[in-house]
Image (cartoon, coloured by chain):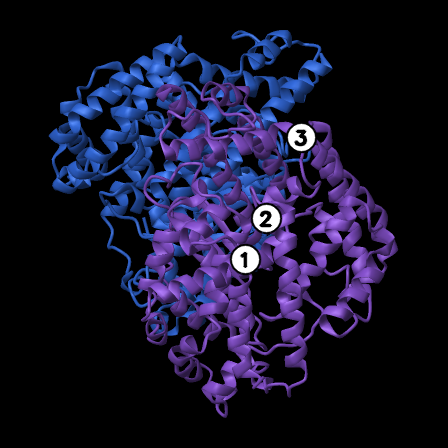
Chain colours: A purple, B blue
Amino acid sequence: MEQTLQRLKEITREVQLLEHINALLGWDQETYMPKGAVEERGDQLALLQGLLHRKSTDPEIGDLLGRLGATEENPMGSSELKDLDKRFIRTVFRLYNRETKLPESLVTEMARVSSKALAVWGEARKENDFSKFAPFLEKLVQLNREKAKCFGFTEHPYDPLLDEFEPWIKTREVEKVFSLLREDLADLLGRIREKPQVKHDFLFSDYPVADQEEFARSVLKDLGYEDNRGRLDLSTHPFTTTLGSDDVRITTRYNSNFFPTGLCGVIHEAGHALYELGMGPEIKGTILSGGTSLGIHESQSRMWENLVGRSRSFWKHYYPRLKAKFPSALRDTSLEEFYKAFNKVESTFIRVEADEVTYSLHIILRFEIELQLITGSLKVKEVPEYWNSTFKKLFGVTPKDDREGCLQDIHWSMGAFGYFPTYALGNLYAAQFFNTLKGEMPGLEGEIEKGNFPLLLSWLREKIHHPGNSMTADELVKSVTGEPLNSRYFVEYLNNKYREIYDL
Amino acid sequence: MEQTLQRLKEITREVQLLEHINALLGWDQETYMPKGAVEERGDQLALLQGLLHRKSTDPEIGDLLGRLGATEENPMGSSELKDLDKRFIRTVFRLYNRETKLPESLVTEMARVSSKALAVWGEARKENDFSKFAPFLEKLVQLNREKAKCFGFTEHPYDPLLDEFEPWIKTREVEKVFSLLREDLADLLGRIREKPQVKHDFLFSDYPVADQEEFARSVLKDLGYEDNRGRLDLSTHPFTTTLGSDDVRITTRYNSNFFPTGLCGVIHEAGHALYELGMGPEIKGTILSGGTSLGIHESQSRMWENLVGRSRSFWKHYYPRLKAKFPSALRDTSLEEFYKAFNKVESTFIRVEADEVTYSLHIILRFEIELQLITGSLKVKEVPEYWNSTFKKLFGVTPKDDREGCLQDIHWSMGAFGYFPTYALGNLYAAQFFNTLKGEMPGLEGEIEKGNFPLLLSWLREKIHHPGNSMTADELVKSVTGEPLNSRYFVEYLNNKYREIYDL
């Protein structure tokens, strides 16, 4: 048994190393690669992904898993094994199953269609012509239905799609949580919209990029993101990528005429990176390392970005420094005015620019559409109308066209169904974790007011980062907060925060 | 036959892609990788090199080569094949033989010993204690003898070692060329040493790094190194690395108190990079791309660095620009004084800092020692004394210790025997090519005086770069210059240049 386990650890370590190599190719492509290299980089990535697929579907893995007693009913294997080994087997079993259950023909077809769909989506969005994109979306929905069938499901065809990004959770659970959340957020937004808007023109001013970068780097250092285990670079879209246990890199972009973009990007990605860098000693360097789900990952990025980085405590410390850095832009602005502007809530159309209150509503809309597309209760051609009418119900406004409506996001054109919900789950997990954190660490706000984050980071490491994916999201939330996922904490947090900002 | 060839092209293309991926890992490690990642990067490289070895020793390659008629006597395969395909088969046959003839035990032992030797060499050099390094050098010599036996040789045990870096050339040929060169260079150096030294103190002054970099980038652009197919970064030791047909990157380092280091490094590496980027359309993206030997590679870097970049014509164009960039350092220095200082000749002890006249003498010394170590006519413990007495004969001075003598270079500690001669061969090839070039392009000097390099680069591309390794070094030299390797051109070039600088 010990030997079998050992061999399984060796193979999965190789899978992990190949994934890190793959990540380097991707990072380089987005940061420093000369433009002329793009086509051949595609060949390199294709070769590597082929190797990765072959390695992670090696029949030897299936054989070893069998000998360790892992089955669909009992993915953790033999009861004689140590707890952490059982969790290791569960992770490998899930990955192996996902990799081997899809026939190669479906993988190829998905790649072929989504590559074409991506290009067409770009044109359709530019030309504001949903009908151009519709046949591809139709095809991608159908392929996702087939995919769900291949993986198999007992409750809902959306379950195996969701499982790709948020392992082990069920559609039913997300539906339950989102339906409560939907009402609470729509209600809060409605109340805010009746109040006068906060002043925020000073955020759109002259913020030289070099100064923004210097400021962002000083914050990054305070947060505990170390130079010798990561780095910050520029890219078109901010991202975090894991190139090794001690090599997790982030990127951002700066807008010289709008301050929040750059800093929020840096803090958000640092949250992802600190998670990846926080694996416990038994987890680090094994396939158990890395975030346990995209939702939990997003909880870390959003906790740092929103619950910490948009808090009054945070700006009590950093605002004087920011003002000193950008004296002309912020000369006439008080901390209070800045704090409110930084947290302005508004019914806008573009998800990636949304505030803390409206963001999850954007997600709920997409989730409802995805579910109905997959079950077939909504037809692709009905999407624009459904989008616009639901948007009006949730936000009180209607997109003027599909460009700022159902054509705005890239995900569907990539064939990714089941991804969106993880963004909103991240908000919920974050607030639920933060509520426990505040209870266990009464001096937290005082620490943040001093720009001291080591205690906060230690808590996150010990409670959330250390287990990597050895705990499922559900196990983790229960172990940290004592109860399953509950949207109450997020709603409470928002209500308390915005009651005061908007004088509700 | 066509299908067999096609399959061989596919497999070798995969080998090439893996090599490019490997190069990216190396490049990243030397430029942007966070320090903490170094150990795991080692694991990634080891995995990749394992994959590369397995792929390039795939028995299918041997089988395909056999079916194409390739044998030791006839490495180009069947006479029915097209010329370029024959050359392709020759390249694959050589690589496959080299990869498969060494038993894995020897490869492992070599890696084990040289890894240890590298560390010990570092200490021995620091402590100026050759006896500490001697047992490792002894072992590495012995392993290199075994290596030679595994590859097999008909004339000289050094042949297969040399072949690793300078394919297809024989020790006998190098010996013949070097013995003439040795006398000519020692004679020229002797005559220079009798003359007063040129003034050069202004090269050691305040040269701010940012300004050096800006200047170097402007030169780089003029040379024809394009931004969309490469990039320039900083690293401890300058290097060039090929990450793809359209992705060849260079690095340099700057010394803020000595001007030549940075610019010469940039021009030298650009010479390597332009070669790699200059493959002809039928060669590009195949295993025939890349330099045909280290000697020919070095001919390109040294031609740009020395024959172009240290010429009076070059500085006629660039010196006014340089002076404008560094007005305080060069205020009182004329073009003539600068040109002479930039070309100062002196008997110094460190190879990497040597001038054009003495450089090859450093190499000849190492070559003679290597030959005798491999044949056994010189014992490891006799190396320091042999080094110092030969040095005195060649340079007229004696190193004060082994640190500036036989312990200075890293190559032997890495187990690399046969590498050194390629540096001097590069000087010879460069001068021989340049002589032909000047004959075929009478306006060359005028072009250089205007900082115009497109004609020069086109000539190099067409004559030298396009064939990649489809031509051996010998074939290439004969095809370009009409005769085999001849040291006369290099000696003539040096005599003409230094007669004038030192008033000989």
The chain under label 2 reads B
What element does badge 1 sit on? helix
On residue A426, which mark appears? 1
Amino acid type, label 1: Gly
Label 3 CA crowd tier, 10 Å (few <14, some 14–19, many 20+): some
Q: Position of residue B222 (x, y in %)?
A: 56, 57
Q: Is B205 situated above or below B305?
A: below
Callouts 2 and 1 in the same chain: no
A256 or B315: nearer the viewer: A256
Which is closer to the viewer, label 2 or label 3?
Answer: 3
Q: Does B440 appear above or below A399?
A: above
Alpha carbon distance from label 2 to label 3: 38 Å
| Label placed on residue B356 | none
Q: Earlier in the sequence, mark 3 or mark 1?
A: 3
B414 or A490: nearer the eye?
A490
Secondary structure at numbered mark 3: loop
In percent of width and height, residue A60 lies at: 51, 19
User: Quarter of the image containing the N terminus of chain A?
Assistant: top left
Name which residue type carries label 2.
Arg
Q: Which residue is mark 3?
A: A102
Estimate the spatial distance between the alpha carbons at disc 3 and disc 1, rounded to whole Å.
28 Å
Amino acid type at image mark 3: Leu
Please report, as a chain letter, where disc 3 is located: A
Front position among marks 2 and 1: 1
Residue at the location (63% across, 85% down)? A197
- Give the labeled residue for mark 2: B229
Work out which quarter of the rendered image holds the C terminus of chain A and state it. bottom right
Q: Position of residue A195 (x, y in %)?
A: 64, 86
At label 2, counting other C-alpha atoms closer than 10 Å, the crowd grade (few under 14, some 14-19, many 20 or more) is many
Q: Judge by depth and name the residue closer to the eye, B402 or B318.
A: B402
Distance from disc 2 to disc 1, alpha carbons, whole Å, reads 40 Å
**Residue B495 at least partly seen:** yes
